[in-house]
Image: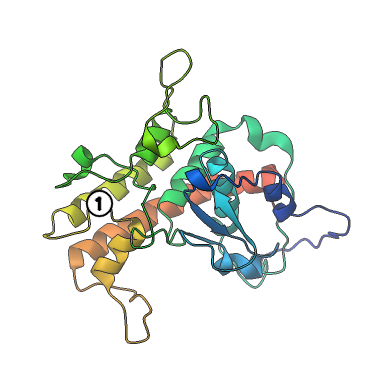
Amino acid sequence: MISTKSIFDYNGLKRINQWLSEYYNNDSLNKLGVMHHGRNDFQSTRGVYISYFDNKDHTSLITPLNLHIQCIYFTVYHCIPANWLNDRDQFLYPNNGWISDTEFQNDCLAFTLFHGQNRISSKEGINHWIPFTEEQVNAREKFDSYFMTDFLRGKILHNYSNTNLFAKSETNKNGKDEPLVFSSESQAVFDAGLKLWKYYHSKPNVNVNASLYDIREYFQGRNKQGKMNNKSSDEKYNQLIENLKYKLKILSEKIEPKVYKYGFLKK
């Protein structure tokens, strides 16, 4: 198959990192993690990841106030595979279409929660990214944080201020929670993730607060150089993680047209 490629003049156009900078929030009390930024082109997508510690320049805090924005940024970089045709394409300052598209925003949140470049680890700090309850995964102990399930249920952002939201759940002014609504593609990702979490929690002596990164490390282990292995000796785990990746790929294909529609990339 022969592909076609459009060439653009990017001179004078604002880039995606300028857009993200408008949503920086330095509320370290409510820090969820750190976004490691890339440059503005496809060649730097591997440098875009989430961890708990800020260990280099070109990072920004992820907080409840900018979580959706940071997830959009993360997803835009990772939902489209890099190749020799697009490796010089520039990620741009978007138009305003994404603002009213809550399905797009929530798709990006789901994508970020279950993507391999989300390297949040409970070994580095409290894991606020657990997308399930103890009852859902049959956990043996209580979690240290309920932030993410509270956020998914709509309990967090109302009356937001720089106070410790991890101490308790905030409710809406009218006393009613407004849960986030997810597309069928996002829900399929959650369902695949739940099967993986439940299988992990069925094992003895596991870390009850494990993140996806921790679960992957538990099953896959590391080589002598300290790099995480690509596969596990546990075949059921291999099936579950591959199913999660497959559902994530379907979600990424749903998101991709909107990346162009909202001007994050030119096509």
Residue 267 pos. (x, y %): 72, 54
Q: Secondary structure at mark 1?
A: helix
Residue 196 pos. (x, y %): 25, 53
Local crowd at mark 1 within 10 Å, few (<14), some, or many (≥20)?
many
Q: Is residue 151 left or right of residue 13?
A: left
Residue 199 pos. (x, y %): 18, 54
- Report if residue 1 is visible in the image: no
The residue shown at (63%, 68%) is 44
The residue shown at (70%, 55%) is 17
Question: Height in image: 128 above or below 245?
Answer: above
Q: Quick one: 168 or 188, which is closer to the camera? A: 168
The residue that mark 1 highlights is 197
Q: Quadrant of residue 232?
A: bottom left
Q: Quick one: 229 or 209, which is closer to the camera? A: 209
Report the coloring of the rendering: rainbow
Q: Identity of the amino acid at label 1? A: Trp
Q: Is residue 213 left or right of residue 72?
A: left
Residue 104 pos. (x, y %): 55, 38
The residue shown at (60%, 51%) is 73
State the residue lying farthest toward the top: 174
- Report if residue 86 is visible in the image: yes
Q: Quadrant of the N terminus?
A: bottom right
